[in-house]
Every structure is written in C-alpha cells, then in structure tokens.
Image (spheres, rainbow, N blue to C red):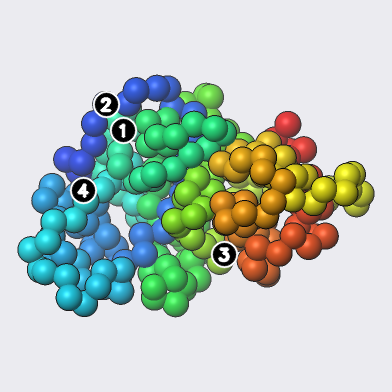
Amino acid sequence: MTEAYINRPSPNFDARTRPIDLIVLHYTGMQDAETAIARLTDPAPVAGKYPGPWQSEDVLPDAALSRVSAHYVVDEAGKIYSLVPEEHRAWHAGASSWEGEGDVNARAIGIEIVNGGHDFGLPAFADAQIDAVIQLLKDIFERWPELNAKRVVGHSDVAPERKADPGEKFPWKRLADAGVSIWPEHVATQLDGDDIASDIQLQLGAIGYDVKQTGAMDNSTKAALVAFQRRFRPSDISGSADEETRFLLVAVAHVLA
C-alpha cells in the first residue's frame, strides 16, 4: 500500500450505473499540477480561469466550460491526489467506448498524470511519477480484485478520434514489466487472410477498440490504429497498416484472449 493520498475533493461526480471493470490513464495536458487540479475540482469553470492553446483566442472569459474530474492525479514528484472516491463516477473520459460499450466513466477509475501533453511539447514522464502510477495501480488492484493488468487502458484507446493521451512517450512497457499493464511477449510472425482492412478491424475490435467491420480503412479504423500504435509501437504513429503493426495486433489480441 502506498503512502496516504493527498485529499483534494472534487464536487464533480455522480452515481455509477454499472460495476467498475476498467482503469483509464490520462495526461492532464495543462501547464502544471495546480492548474490541472484546480480545473478538475472547479464546480463552475470558466474560460478565463484556464487560458491555453486548447481554446480559441476570442473566447469570452466568462464562457462556461464543462465540469470535469478524475479519481486521482499523480504529479511529477510522485505525489498522489485523491479527488473522487472510487465508488463514484468521475467525469474524465467524455464521449468514449470500449469493448462495445459507451459511457466509460460509468465503469472506469480515471487517473490523471500531470504532463503538459502535446500542447506543451509532450515532455517525458518523471521516473518518480511513473513509480507512483505503478504503485497506485497495484493499490487499486488490491481494492478491486476484478481489475488487473488487462483492464488498464489509455484515454486515446477509449476515445481515439478525440484524444491522444497519455501519448506516445508514456512508458507502457515499464508498466507491463511491473505487472500493471499488458505487453506482447511473443510477436506474431505469420498473418492469415488477404483482406487487410477487415483483418485489422477484427483485431482492433477483439482488443476493445470501437471499430465497425466495414472492410475499408475508414477514419474511425485509422484513428483506432493510431491509438494502438501510440501504445504498442510509438516509433511510428502514422496509422499505416504496415506488417509490424499487423503482427503486433495479432500478438496483443492473443494476450487479451
């Protein structure tokens, strides 16, 4: 069990409508931890309090923003802030879907990891911060036996057409080595079938991505493929259906089978 979490309660939550079976990792994408925590705990956020590249320059300072929250925030030094009790539904994933079900917030615990994200150059994650994320995940697994390494995903996994966090610099392999995420041990070396788009859609769907079997590399399929690459092959996140990506799709689907 990690040291006591720092309590920074957020009023932005409601009742869950289904059991918890997922953990979603995010980056905050804001200037610093205090700004992010302020935004996640603000009961009446307005644009003027949170200026940044995510909103247009001509937005009115008193324009209302959506209320958001998460269950936890992990800062760069490894401090863990508790915002919403796990038993409640925090508002972190937005429009999202995993394994054919929407309203990811209803089933997920959300962890925000302090990092400027793509709007601020996507800085590297600090070692102490990742150590704390790993320990937090282990703590959550102890509290919820139905949660395990297979049930940890990124925001970009559940909302690939809208989100890119926690981003291609997030060390998923390090989490897998610690037993709190997945990584394929043996990459496939043989592919079956000649219908590449259909095969990719089947594999993405088997992993959990929200793609339809259209037989064409449509926008939603490519977005899901980019999200997959961000996590399992971050050296190239072009969305190209190259052989390495296809081998990895088979391998990851096998891990989750």
Q: Residues within 10 Å of mark 3 (few under 14, many from 20)?
A: many
Residue 242 x, y percent position in the rendering: 78, 62
Residue 148 x, y percent position in the rendering: 57, 33
Residues tagged 4 and 1 counted as in contact (Cβ below 8 A): no
Q: Quarter-wise, where is residue 61 in the image?
A: bottom left
- First along the sequence among labels 4 and 2: 2
- Residue type at numbered disc 3: Glu
- First along the sequence among labels 3 and 4: 4
Q: Name the residue under label 3.
A: 168
Q: Kindly identify the residue that appears in the image at 40 percent across and 35 percent down.
A: 103
- First along the sequence among labels 2 and 1: 2
Q: Mark 1 points at which residue?
A: 89
- First along the sequence among labels 2 and 3: 2
Residue 69 x, y percent position in the rendering: 27, 46
| Disc number lying in front (3 or 4) | 4
Secondary element type, mark 1: strand
The quadrant in which the C terminus is found is: top right
Q: Name the residue under label 4.
A: 67
Give the residue at the far left of this rendering: 62
